[in-house]
Image (cartoon, helix red, strand yellow):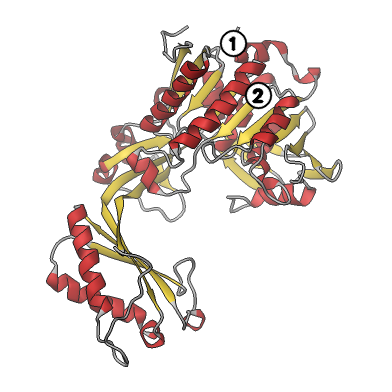
Amino acid sequence: MSASERLLQNHRPQDGPLRILAASGQLGYGIPEAALQRGLARRPHLIGCDMGSIDPGPYYLGSGQMAAPAAMVYRDLELVLSAALALGIPLIIGSAGTAGARPQLEATVALVRAIAQAKGLRFRLTTVASDIAPERVVQALQAGRLSPIGPMAMPSEADIRLCSHIVGQCGTETLVRALREPTDVLIAGRACDTAVFAALPEMLGYPTALCQHMAKIIECTSLCCNPSARDAMLAELDQDGFTLESMNPLAHATPASVAAHALYEQANPFEVDEPTGTLLLQQAQYQALDAHRTRVSGAQWRPRAQATLKIEGAARLGERWVLLAGVADPTLLASLDEILQVVEARVRALLPGHWSMHPHIYGQGAVRALPQAQHSQHEAGLVIEFVAPTADLARTAAGVFKQNLLHHGFAGRLCSAGNLAFAFTPSELDAGTAYRFVLYHVMQAAPLAEIFRVETWVVDNAGQAGARP
């Protein structure tokens, strides 16, 4: 019998609390092992891990590459896979390989199979593919079923077709469908963080509002604690609320720190939108059980008539080189924006072609917009991007721009030896392919069962994925 079957057949809410261990808020950046072992000693019913995010920008979605180092991903996967199989409990991983696109899902599965071979493990593996064909998105655009999130522009049909990868962010309803397949390990492509931790509890009959609220908090592990940390987090869920406890004895889940986590990644701290409904937190209550644990209750749930689907898509922008330099001349700093524009115009006369320049001036607003009076008058760091259809053109633009800015004769200059300081040479660095977000939108009336493809295999102790069980 698989781990999911055992849990679904043998546990009911009236039997007592369900223990959910959140092992990682972003698997692949190092799971603190001591805290994980403390959590495992508490005999959890389920281990969940979020593995990705759209926060790192469009590169990982566009390229299909993992953000985390492969060696650390292997280490973290080995820890949670071995633990779940040893305890005979389900392991659920969401947003495989950072952005959850097909290449990243396949790379994650390949690492899991390598671990199985190295450790002689055998288990049932279920995957959820989250990729969406461009034509399906084009059809939604044509039918008026696509709406932007925030300041995103509506894409053209041509823009959509240029996307190298488009994914949908599957929710609880999709993972519930996947978990109806007997399985030990579930690895989903792009997924809502909350779905990883809420799907099985909802299937077991725990209140949706509590499942979703708990999942919203523990998906970041001990980030909701004081001080915040990355250690494993244990939630004990019953029919009236849940108790939160970090497995790091120095990270304390207090009412203030847990309640404050409602602000995390949310414009509205009282309403959290999920694919199947909205989590309402106006009546949520947070009670300290002791200095280390907090009890949470009171959340409500407003279901949506039909689940919505957030979609994300990225397209290649060009090849990118970056110029790094420093400026310490107060006269140059006072007119830096205008001088950059003058030098750019000069370089464009020397180097025709479709290249673009994107300056980031640290000390004068690169991190956030600053009024002129707060600009640094002593020194600033220049990080200037050059993007072009080819790496050679981007590199040429960066090099020519550097030399022209280095010796630009701006008004009031006192020394002609050079305007820039360099920490190292070469000061122009290959930054690889640049991507842009085309899609950060919500699709209405999406055929979820068609979009999210569920497959199950038996992985044997040679690391091979056999036929469906």
Camera-side residue of 423 and 302 = 423
Q: Which mark is residue 46?
A: 2
Marks 1 and 2, the one that precedes in the sequence: 1
Going by the picture, which residue comes out furthest to the right?
A: 290
Q: Position of residue 373 (x, y in %)?
A: 50, 83
Going by the picture, which residue comes out furthest to the front?
A: 424
Q: Is residue 369 above or below residue 31?
A: below
Q: Position of residue 383 (x, y in %)?
A: 37, 66
Task: Kindly tell me whether residue 188 is visible in this rendering.
Answer: yes
Q: Quadrant for residue 342, please give it.
A: bottom left
Q: Quadrant for residue 288, please give it.
A: top right
Q: CA distance from mark 1 to mark 2?
A: 13 Å
Q: Position of residue 335 (x, y in %)?
A: 36, 84
Task: Kindly tell me whether residue 170 is visible in this rendering.
Answer: no
Query: Which quadrant would the N terminus be assigned to in this image?
Result: top right
CA neighbours of label 1 inside 10 A, class few (<14), some (14 to 19), many (20+): some
Camera-side residue of 341 and 248 = 248
Question: For numbered disc 2, what is the local secondary structure?
Answer: strand
The residue positioned 61% from the left and 14% from the top of the image is 3
Q: Which residue is mark 1?
A: 2
Q: How many numbered marks does the figure carry?
A: 2
The residue positioned 58% from the left and 39% from the top of the image is 25
Question: For numbered disc 1, what is the local secondary structure?
Answer: loop
Q: Is residue 274 left or right of residue 127?
A: right
Q: Do the numbered discs 1 and 2 sit on residues whose CB atoms are within 8 Å?
A: no
CA neighbours of label 2 inside 10 A, class few (<14), some (14 to 19), many (20+): many
**What amino acid is labelled 2 in the image?**
Leu
Q: Is residue 47 above or below residue 8?
A: below
**What amino acid is labelled 1 in the image?**
Ser
Q: Position of residue 336 (x, y in %)?
A: 35, 80
Q: Which mark is residue 242?
A: none
